[in-house]
């Protein structure tokens, strides 16, 4: 029933966007749990087996292994707020609340986009302190490409949803 409500009959948010919101929620929960539970989630910790892929990632982006990096911790708390908004949007969409679901989708997707841009700018302003040690191949395939997903997909979501909302607003009569 949920997917029927979030499907193609939804006037503002296409099905693929609902799937994206659920997918990104799962990724953000895993990411936040890794960061907020360090050092238990790191190599040698009792929860490391749940987060083994991060052993590779922290060699690429040293911020994830830096226990004193407050930006990564703050980003993790924002991830959890994002998840809450994503799930609220999907819930509203599944209940036929298209306008409210679309509005929350726009807000949370904008947050993802700008959080990712801010993360990149923070790294650039630090002189690439956390990723500058990488060879070009590792930097591109293990940092730039994966992180680009969090820019490209939100831009596509915003283009789609804002376009549909904008088209609907053109038909609203003003007094």
Image (spheres, rainbow, N blue to C red):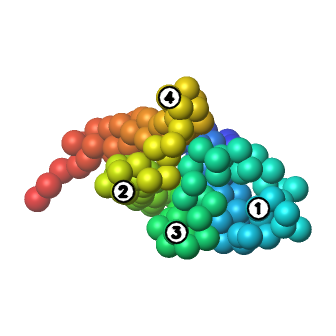
Q: Is residue 94 visible?
A: no
Nearer the N terminus, badge 4 or badge 1? Answer: 1
Within 10 angstroms of label 3, few (less than 14), some, or many (20 or more) residues?
few
Look at 61% across and 49% down and name the residue there. Answer: 24
Asked if the residues shown at circle 1 and circle 2 are in contact, with their CB atoms under 8 angstroms apart, the answer is no
Q: CA distance from mark 2 to mark 4?
A: 18 Å
Nearer the N terminus, badge 4 or badge 3? Answer: 3
Q: Which mark is residue 42?
A: 1
Nearer the N terminus, badge 1 or badge 2? Answer: 1
Q: Which residue is mark 4?
A: 136
Asked if the residues shown at circle 4 and circle 1 are in contact, with their CB atoms under 8 angstroms apart, the answer is no
Q: CA distance from mark 1 to mark 2?
A: 24 Å
Q: Which residue is mark 3?
A: 69
Asked if the residues shown at circle 2 and circle 4 are in contact, with their CB atoms under 8 angstroms apart, the answer is no
Name the spot of residue 9 as percent of width and height, x first: 55, 38
Outermost residue on the left side: it is 175
Q: CA distance from mark 4 to mark 1?
A: 25 Å
Asked if the residues shown at circle 4 and circle 3 are in contact, with their CB atoms under 8 angstroms apart, the answer is no
Nearer the N terminus, badge 3 or badge 2? Answer: 3
Q: Which residue is mark 2?
A: 126
Query: Image height check: is 128 above or below 97?
Result: above
Within 10 angstroms of label 1, few (less than 14), some, or many (20 or more) residues?
many
Q: Nearer the viewer, residue 115 or 168?
A: 115
């Amino acid at each position: 029933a949920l997917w029927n409500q979030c499907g193609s009959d939804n006037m503002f948010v296409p099905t693929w966007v609902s799937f994206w919101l659920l997918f990104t929620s799962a990724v953000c929960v895993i990411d936040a749990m890794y960061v907020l539970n360090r050092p238990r989630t790191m190599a040698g910790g009792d929860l490391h087996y749940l987060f083994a892929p991060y052993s590779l990632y922290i060699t690429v982006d040293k911020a994830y292994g830096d226990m004193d990096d407050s930006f990564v911790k703050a980003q993790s708390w924002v991830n959890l707020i994002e998840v809450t908004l994503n799930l609220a949007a999907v819930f509203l969409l599944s209940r036929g609340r298209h306008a409210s679901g679309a509005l929350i989708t726009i807000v949370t997707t904008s947050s993802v986009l700008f959080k990712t841009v801010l993360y990149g700018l923070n790294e650039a302003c630090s002189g690439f302190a956390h990723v500058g040690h990488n060879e070009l191949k590792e930097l591109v395939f293990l940092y730039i490409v994966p992180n680009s997903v969090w820019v490209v997909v939100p831009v596509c979501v915003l283009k789609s949803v804002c376009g549909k909302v904008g088209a609907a607003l053109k038909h609203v009569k003003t007094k």
